[in-house]
Amino acid sequence: MNDRDFAPLIGEIRKNLEEKGFPVKTQRDFPNRSEVIEIIELCSRIMFPGFFEDGQVYSVSSSRNFQSLFAQLDEKLYGQLMIALKNCECKEVKECARRTEREFLERLPYVQGMLLKDIEAMFDGDPAALSRESIILSYPGFYAVMVFRLAHELYTRNVPLLPRMMTEHAHSLTGIDINPGATIGEYFCMDHGTGIVIGETTEIGNWCKLYQGVTLGALSTSLGQQMSGVKRHPKLEDHVTIYSNASILGGATVIGEGAVVGGSAFITESVPKNARVVMKAGEMSIRMKEQKD
Amino acid sequence: MNDRDFAPLIGEIRKNLEEKGFPVKTQRDFPNRSEVIEIIELCSRIMFPGFFEDGQVYSVSSSRNFQSLFAQLDEKLYGQLMIALKNCECKEVKECARRTEREFLERLPYVQGMLLKDIEAMFDGDPAALSRESIILSYPGFYAVMVFRLAHELYTRNVPLLPRMMTEHAHSLTGIDINPGATIGEYFCMDHGTGIVIGETTEIGNWCKLYQGVTLGALSTSLGQQMSGVKRHPKLEDHVTIYSNASILGGATVIGEGAVVGGSAFITESVPKNARVVMKAGEMSIRMKEQKD
Amino acid sequence: MNDRDFAPLIGEIRKNLEEKGFPVKTQRDFPNRSEVIEIIELCSRIMFPGFFEDGQVYSVSSSRNFQSLFAQLDEKLYGQLMIALKNCECKEVKECARRTEREFLERLPYVQGMLLKDIEAMFDGDPAALSRESIILSYPGFYAVMVFRLAHELYTRNVPLLPRMMTEHAHSLTGIDINPGATIGEYFCMDHGTGIVIGETTEIGNWCKLYQGVTLGALSTSLGQQMSGVKRHPKLEDHVTIYSNASILGGATVIGEGAVVGGSAFITESVPKNARVVMKAGEMSIRMKEQKD
Amino acid sequence: MNDRDFAPLIGEIRKNLEEKGFPVKTQRDFPNRSEVIEIIELCSRIMFPGFFEDGQVYSVSSSRNFQSLFAQLDEKLYGQLMIALKNCECKEVKECARRTEREFLERLPYVQGMLLKDIEAMFDGDPAALSRESIILSYPGFYAVMVFRLAHELYTRNVPLLPRMMTEHAHSLTGIDINPGATIGEYFCMDHGTGIVIGETTEIGNWCKLYQGVTLGALSTSLGQQMSGVKRHPKLEDHVTIYSNASILGGATVIGEGAVVGGSAFITESVPKNARVVMKAGEMSIRMKEQKD
Amino acid sequence: MNDRDFAPLIGEIRKNLEEKGFPVKTQRDFPNRSEVIEIIELCSRIMFPGFFEDGQVYSVSSSRNFQSLFAQLDEKLYGQLMIALKNCECKEVKECARRTEREFLERLPYVQGMLLKDIEAMFDGDPAALSRESIILSYPGFYAVMVFRLAHELYTRNVPLLPRMMTEHAHSLTGIDINPGATIGEYFCMDHGTGIVIGETTEIGNWCKLYQGVTLGALSTSLGQQMSGVKRHPKLEDHVTIYSNASILGGATVIGEGAVVGGSAFITESVPKNARVVMKAGEMSIRMKEQKD
Amino acid sequence: MNDRDFAPLIGEIRKNLEEKGFPVKTQRDFPNRSEVIEIIELCSRIMFPGFFEDGQVYSVSSSRNFQSLFAQLDEKLYGQLMIALKNCECKEVKECARRTEREFLERLPYVQGMLLKDIEAMFDGDPAALSRESIILSYPGFYAVMVFRLAHELYTRNVPLLPRMMTEHAHSLTGIDINPGATIGEYFCMDHGTGIVIGETTEIGNWCKLYQGVTLGALSTSLGQQMSGVKRHPKLEDHVTIYSNASILGGATVIGEGAVVGGSAFITESVPKNARVVMKAGEMSIRMKEQKD
């Protein structure tokens, strides 16, 4: 294609953007994806020393190694917070970034403690788990909840963009999509995990277990931002188990303590304590239309 | 293992390939995966300047930057088209590659326009979306439809392999599998998205919304290429909503305008306009067999 | 944050780890993720020469190229086996690693043969497949079964960690989670694949076909390692087809030869030969609660 | 080392910098080394298509490839010029950067033409040269003069920092240090080249030949910037040959047309036309003190 | 080449090594080249913040940035010291590595102070220097003395291998070879620098200036280790200037204060204060044999 | 710069190339620089196992490691030979490449043996050498002779381009430029080495020692290819020592056994056995012109 043809294309592309309210800026001011990934990696190496390294590390748990990781995290997180908070309401962005970062670092032991409990739940819940170590090393359900618990700490401190970029990174790697705004209790277990969706206003109690493909979602709306802040996602009390591909929808839906929801169930109303809910399946049928081969 | 043992293994491996009709070639003639990914990246940086960069860019929306991106895209796309079209029916591969590439570049403003409408639909449909920008930055549903709309332009110009490699790249990152042959209208919204499958002959109207795990698929067949070109996937009219993990199968299946299909529904027959289809769920049951702990 | 604050955080983090039985080690002794990925890549390049290269290769199927790939695989696999087997019960780790590696290499032609049959099944089962080549190049269902069949050879030789790290790599790329312990017959076809879960003690016959989102899983348990080794996942006889998002659970559940299970079905009991099982769907209902817009 | 100890060190380091007039800035505003290297690479690929690529290029000399290279060069050079010119005297940095860049690009054919003549001289002067191609591919003398001729175009347009960073990159690779301010005629040949130094105000005529280790330098001074702009380096008229490790110093020193200076000569006064200057060497002597072994 | 041929070659190669006293070890225990380079880089970024970064740094001179750099340096240096000191005579390697590292870090402000003085000397001595900043950014003479001064601190603390690997890295980049054992005073200036050699027992006073190609070396010996520790290289008193390609050899050779040695001089005896030494050059001669063209 | 301006520039650039006999090709057919570097690295890792690795290697000297290195070298060398020999006179390029490669591999033990002797000479000749190991690890003189001895094996087998690209890589890293055609005896020692030049038809006996900046070169010519094959460079008999920056030129020049040539000597005539040649230096002079400060 002769380069003379590009000019009208560029014109159209710019016009499209402007018409939709995307001013053509000369500089980018979004957090940096690769820095966000490094922030996650540094946190994981601090909380679980020796499990997330890939090259040679000579003194995995030495103070010097922890110091180095903290200092790097400190620098990178501050940089990304400066970008993310640029348009926030606080008067003094630097001060806000510094405070948020300090608070985040101070929460790392708490987050780590929560994750150690999650590991217990996953180990008890999975006979195929060879060891607690193998869960940290290779379970996507663990990775996703780790990133969520980190991102949640930024979400609750009103940091825009960054928490979502973190959970979307985990989403891309694991297929598990947890909104950083969700509230998730102790001893949380996701098995296999691909396709799990946990919405922004979901509340999950302690000792809950979700299988792959489970949705804790909202009913469809086209009201967009008018619904922002409204509770739109369900609540799970303690000791709830939800089997694969079940969907629990709606802000008023509560799954009572100890209830078990069967696979593929589509639930838009509350379920009492200790109930067992299954789809009416199992009967034979010949109604399924087949492709005529 | 002593290297003397490799020869018989190599012999067996070659024999296997030959028996199945994979001639042992001395040279590879497939499009290059990493080039395909760069093509996607260049297109996305052209259509949404400033959203897909990760390093330093000094003049995101300047003409010089657009020119540079177009020129790089021009070169890379032509190279991969030359490979992909090598065995196509056109007499003159170079001419064919050049024409296809020019047409593709000229469609970028149209594709961008469609995507800007998709962003509107996603913003209206998701109270958790902080801004339109955040959708471009981090929503897998947006990324998947972007790559689909690009790949579709090559598919409709009879380019082999390349379009599928593009959508499979998006599939790997997002868990959303859209065949580049599908027909998708305006203001299309996929929420969360993991596990969505949209088959080759699917038709989707305007303002449709799909949740994670939705299948718009074909009934099973073992006829393979004999069915190629036959309409095998469903049609969705305008304003259809399909909840999580529902499956709509078959080429004669039509979901009427404004219909809503509940989660986990398994649909192999048409659904009338404005219908609400749900699985008979919600009743309590104790029939679910449990693992005796 | 002033670096003086890190010390107490480090103290807490260490205490957390110790309390949960994660001794703070000075050296890491886990297999190396990037090496594991290279092992998969080398195997795939040996079995399907020319399909998994991305740079320039001058003599894809020459003996010299095979020799080079085998020798590299030999070295890398031995290194990772030495790490993985460090704590195994065998008296002589080196001897064990050497034997396991030799046996694994000798199985490559067998694994390749099985995969060539899987390609046949996928080609017959998918009218959208342009060619057998395109399946190897871009089908996630093929990639996942390839990695599974490789990992399974290590699993059956009692190698810890490594097989799971291999299948989790495929899981991350494809959304398909096959435990390396599963038993899978010939001509196996997974279409689209995202969300498929196949548990450790699953048995699958010949000519079976699974769609995206299908779970072949266990019933929930909190007994953890006490259930290890017990058959907990279902058996599929030959020629079984399972549609999208169906879940088949439990170690006593058998899906009879030629049976077809409809989408979203939740099955915890056996299904006879040639049966057609569908959820009672299709009836219209207005019971679905909607978000009041 | 306990991290508490860093604070006083940091204090000392900052104090040192401030005392010497290096204000502790929060942001770096120097041209980017890796960008500078890419600018050189793009220029070399434009002027000598096919000689400086290392990966696969499908259409080395096609218009599309040239366009792509020019557009990338355009973008990168502009970015670095913006940084380099930030503190220059021109009123409008953008305008200045744009003009400088346009002028530079327009000089590329001239620079290329000069280099093609240099290749002739090197080919005629080196019986070991297999072909003109091999000179472009692997002769450090060619690489150094190429980078010099590019940098000189920026130097004469008063661009600070950038030209020197370019020639220092070549210096690091080749051991040849040519100040971008030097004036060098046509058909210039440097053989082997390591250790050659050509100072800022040097003038070199046509058809000159320098061997390794030759210095065209200034006499020592401690006047620094007071001497800036003064002619401090020698002049070589046409057809001058200087053998290895000879030093020609001083701004009033002129080596006349056709003169030959022998190796290791140390020249601080002018040499007439066609002269042959050698050190009084060759006589045997036993005065050299030896290490007593 | 058929792989069967490798075995005898391997046998020969091993035999060669063993005969020369290189036992065929199974594990490498040398410091890591790329880590050594990173150590240099971290030191340079600490001492000259903002001059050696190439990517985006948000707060070049903030405490957080210094802390991060110190902590990383701390970790990396300790790791390499552990390797390098493995065979040293100290009883407790860990203790020795820790002490050496602490002492090294504490010397950084001193080293920086020396380098700031070197910059002064280079600025005063080079009319072509645009600014002190440009010296740090692009002068090989500065880079070489910086690495020397760092390496010297390890050399004087009896660290084997590491100091030499550091100066050889600088040697490779700049062509300047300074043995880490040399003693170099304040305000040291090397101009251009390629080919400078400064031997292990050299002593250099304050305000000395060396041009490219200057050797401060030893007389040839074949006594090897028997001469180790003996003073074999010359001494330069204060304010000495040595022009390009001059060689000053021998441990008893002293160049007196204020002396100037002309280019290409070959000096094996002492030179008195304020002397001017030049080779008897400048006279015309026709004795130089020429290639008959 | 507006992209419309590129077309005339491209036109000029192409015209320049064509006028000078560089046909504008569409495909590059030169050996690949990065592959050449890998070939050197593989050879060095085979000959000196454990000295040139930078990452983790588990079994440096095991047969499996050697096999892997040989097989990789085998593949890469063959690929580059195919490119380099494309235009050679042999009828059957493949056959020629295969034979050359086999012969090269079979010479590796011989080359290694020569290098082990060179190490002896360097160790005996340098009191600063801590150990033989440190010479392999960090001495540029060793690296340069290693690459030369490898390249020489290809040169003597009439491989074009490749040998020179190898020695130019070493030249760039070490500043030592040895033409692959030179003949160099046993126990060869280059100390420091920067600036050494050894021409194509040079002959060097056993136990010779060269210091930095020594040129063994040709007299200047402008006859180019007419002189190709003619002996143009000097001969050094056994046990010759040449001090820094001396130049020995001409094909008829012979330095007799045991002779020592002082630094900066410029020699164009033969020197008898055991002679000591020095420049007439050392006398004081005030003739050196100085910059008036």
Image (cartoon, coloured by chain):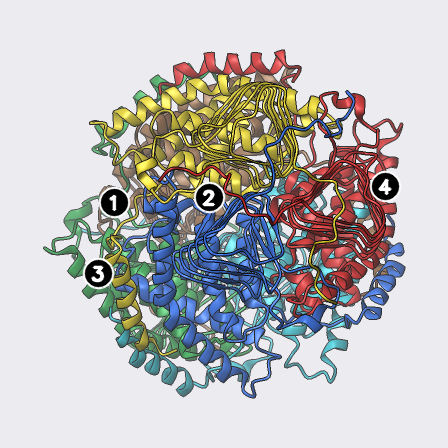
Chain colours: A yellow, B blue, C red, D green, E brown, F cyan
Q: What subunit carries mark 3?
A: D
Q: Is residue F114 visible?
A: no
Residue beneath disc 2: E170
Quick check: E127 left or right of A31?
Answer: left
Q: Name the spot of residue D130 as percent of width and height, x first.
A: 56, 77
Q: Tag 1 or tag 2, which sits nearer the N-term?
A: 1
Disc 4 and disc 1: Cα gap in Å?
68 Å
Residue beneath disc 3: D251
Residue beneath disc 1: E125
- Look at the numbered disc 3 and give the secondary structure of its residue: loop
Q: Which disc, if any, is residue C100? A: 4
For the residues beneath circles 2 and 4, the answer to whether they share a chain is no
Q: What subunit carries mark 4?
A: C
Type of the residue with mark 4? Thr
- Mark 3 or mark 1, whichever is nearer to me: 1
Disc 3 and disc 1: Cα gap in Å?
16 Å
- Look at the numbered disc 4 and give the secondary structure of its residue: helix
Type of the residue with mark 3? Gly
Label 3 close to label 4 by CB (< 8 Å):
no
- Mark 2 or mark 4, whichever is nearer to me: 4
Q: Name the spot of residue C98 as percent of width and height, x first.
A: 85, 41
Q: Residue at x 26, y 34 (%)?
A: D26
- Mark 2 or mark 1, whichever is nearer to me: 2
Type of the residue with mark 2? Ala
Q: How crowded is mark 1: few (under 14 residues within 10 Å), some or many (20 or more)?
A: many
Q: Is residue E11 above or below residue B148?
A: above
Quick check: C120 left or right of B216?
Answer: right
- Mark 3 or mark 2, whichever is nearer to me: 2
Label 3 close to label 1 by CB (< 8 Å):
no
